[in-house]
Image: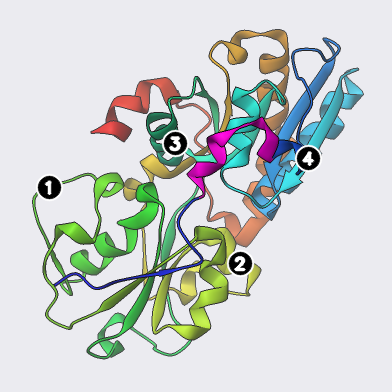
Amino acid sequence: MERRTFLNGALGLGALAGLGALTGCGLVGSAGAADDKTIRLIVTESAPYQEPTKIAQRILEGQGWTVEAKYVTDIVQPNIAVANGEFDANYFQHGAYLQQFIQDNDLDLEAAFYEYGSPGGIYSNRHASLEDLPDGAKIALPVDPSNNGRALALLAKAGLLELAGDKSVIHLSQKDIVDNPRGFEFVEVDQQSLSKTLPDVDAGFLFVRLGAEIGLTPDDALAFEEDADSLPYVCVVAAKPGFAETEKGRALEAAYHSDEVKEWFAGYLGGVLPTPWDRDPAADLKEWSA
């Protein structure tokens, strides 16, 4: 039986109600009205996003560009702000999340280019292995649909759950559980709050970056996604269609794909985050959506 608890609410997609919601957050501007040599970015406030952006900014400014980067923790407004023309591009999400957001909200955005792969795993402050999880254990999951099934897939791979059918992990949810012999209770949490929730549950799914923020590494995970499982979860720079082919887009991609940025990723948590810069997001869309 599905047991479902919500903490901190689902994604505030009702925020699409209008530009007024953004005005109060100081996000209103106009990328289109900016000087041709100005690039406006909205970026999540976390190391794998913030540090590469700072490196790219230094490179671009050395080439005569002006780069305005706004750092936020919100995971709804950046797509709205780019779609509204307030920023040229955003960098805060993986491709699966972007595609789900576009589909749910009918926005005209696309992945301009890849930046890094974002695997995750199941972590616990209380138990040393999946086998140690007690019957009825509370396990925290990201509430957003594109990430909701990732821990379920790991638990199924370990033989602790049975899932129906052969769905892509992007589309898995608790509705696909056909056997939960240990009676696990799944607590759905806003993804930005997963690390804060970990002390209150038996285990929880964390992205690598969220684990790092509380001192955890992939070696601490009870179960961890393999690279082959992480394709839908490669983080992207997103913009309006055609941006990647503009002078701004090409300059931005070159800066984000610079040797300096690659070196930063190589040194972050021992290089656990891959940089699949030779892949084309557009070519992977079919697989994301399968």
Mark 2 nearby-residue class (10 Å; few <14, some 14–19, many ≥20): some
215 left or right of 65 in image: left
Q: Mark 2 points at which residue?
A: 212
Amino acid type, residue under disc 1 in the picture: Asp
Residue 43 drawn at (x, y percent):
69, 41
Separation of residues labelled 4 and 2 (CA atoms): 22 Å
Residue 240 drawn at (x, y percent):
57, 18
Q: Do the residues labelled 1 and 4 touch (CB within 8 Å)?
A: no
Separation of residues labelled 2 and 3 (CA atoms): 26 Å
Name the image quarter holding residue 187.
Answer: bottom left
Separation of residues labelled 4 and 3 (CA atoms): 21 Å
Which is closer to the viewer, label 4 or label 2? 4
Mark 4 nearby-residue class (10 Å; few <14, some 14–19, many ≥20): some
Q: Mark 3 points at which residue?
A: 101
Amino acid type, residue under disc 2 in the picture: Ala
Q: Is residue 206 magenta?
A: no
Helix, strand or loop status at disc 3: helix
Q: Which of marks 1 and 4 is nearer the N terminus?
A: 4
Amino acid type, residue under disc 4 in the picture: Lys
Highlighted magenta segment, given as a residue range: 12-21
Q: Name the residue under label 4.
A: 70
Separation of residues labelled 2 and 1 (CA atoms): 32 Å
Q: Which of marks 2 and 3 is nearer the N terminus?
A: 3
At x 34%, y 81%, the residue is 138
Residue 269 drawn at (x, y percent):
61, 61
